[in-house]
Image (cartoon, coloured by chain):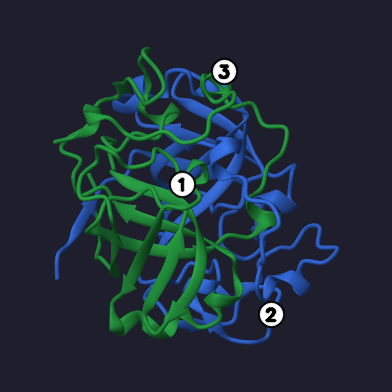
Chain colours: A green, B blue
Amino acid sequence: MQKIVYKPIGIIHSSYKQREGVPIQGALSRNSKGKVEVFPEYKAGLKDLGEFSHIILLYHFHLAKGYSLLSKPFLENEKHGIFAIRAPKRPNPIGFSVVKLEKVIGNVLHVSEVDIVDGTMLLDIKPYVSKFDVRTGTKDGWLTEKLKGAKEHKADDRYSP
Amino acid sequence: MQKIVYKPIGIIHSSYKQREGVPIQGALSRNSKGKVEVFPEYKAGLKDLGEFSHIILLYHFHLAKGYSLLSKPFLENEKHGIFAIRAPKRPNPIGFSVVKLEKVIGNVLHVSEVDIVDGTMLLDIKPYVSKFDVRTGTKDGWLTEKLKGAKEHKADDRYSP
């Protein structure tokens, strides 16, 4: 089987030193702050990023060991397929978060709405573009009922190593 | 430098045999169809995915050779930082698309709003969840003016190998 090899382009810093206690999604935790340190050799790639209010972060779930094709996600006591949930123990443990970009200072992005563990390896940054990324009237599957009235939720220890 | 190794979990099929002519974003090309073939060993992970109307695909830009930290994206004649645009020639060439899930038949997802070249290697699938993924009132940087009135746009040859 073909292998795909990537390398970290930076490190994500947050106040969450372990999975337990991390907000389950940044959109539900608007005041959760962090810093994205982009390694100096990639700094030129940040040109004009500061004009966007939100960005997409792709990163490596470095704490995830192995994976399960069926898993009980947060908010839920039933098992769902790993591709129908956002849990970190995935065949390729790639994390995806939309965060709010507060400011860019040199090679450091100051962000909020953060749901990422401290020390996470950054793989990519993309601008969040409403005309590309917003879908309205979606069907949100098993999450529809679970998210009614949801505000902030913190992770428990179910995905800890 | 640490390496991160992933493996394809499937293949994306579409009518686009090369970069040129691919819609630049699926949201602007609602009728562009494709199929996501998930390798049989991962099929169990698709449980309950069919309840979602939209999904996130993460994939490897297999045609991208090398990268540029500054690049002229589609719709634009100015260079921007690679992290402020969606172009494939990125330090880690990971593609991100939101597509509409029409139906799931066995290990094959029938999708629309596709902006992906035929034969692309799939890395991950996540459910698109409006409460997690929709941001309103965003600032869309250099794209704000370019997208006014935008409907469908097709790629030219600027990212061909």
Q: Around disc 1, counting alpha carbons within 10 Å, would you say few (fewer than 14), some (14 to 19), or many (20 or more)?
A: many
- Residue lying farthest top? A78
Residue under disc 3 on the same chain as residue under disc 1: yes
Judging by the rendered image, the residue that carries numbered circle 3 is A145
Dot 2 amino acid type: Glu
The chain carrying label 3 is A
Look at label 3 and name its amino acid.
Glu
Seen at 25% across and 65% down, the residue is A8
Query: What residue is shown with label 2?
Result: B76
- Residues under numbered marks 2 and 1 in contact, where contact means CB atoms less than 8 Å apart: no
Q: Secondary structure at mark 1?
A: helix
User: Residue B8's image quarter?
Assistant: top left
Which numbered circle lies on residue A26?
A: 1
Q: Chain of mark 1?
A: A
Comes first in the chain, label 3 or label 1: 1
Q: Position of residue A4 (x, y in %)?
A: 27, 55
**Residue sitting at x 72%, y 38%:** A136
Question: Hey, what amino acid is under mark 1?
Answer: Gly
Residue at image coords 35%, 66% = A35
Residue at mark 3 to residue at mark 1: CA–CA distance? 19 Å
Quadrant in the picture for the N terminus of chain A = top left
Residue A15 pos. (x, y %): 28, 55
Q: Determine the secondary structure under disc 2.
A: loop
Do the residues at pointers 2 and 1 share their chain? Answer: no
Name of the residue lying farthest toward the right: B149
Label 2 crowd (10 A; few <14 / some 14-19 / many >=20): few
Label 2 and label 1: CA atoms lie apart by: 31 Å
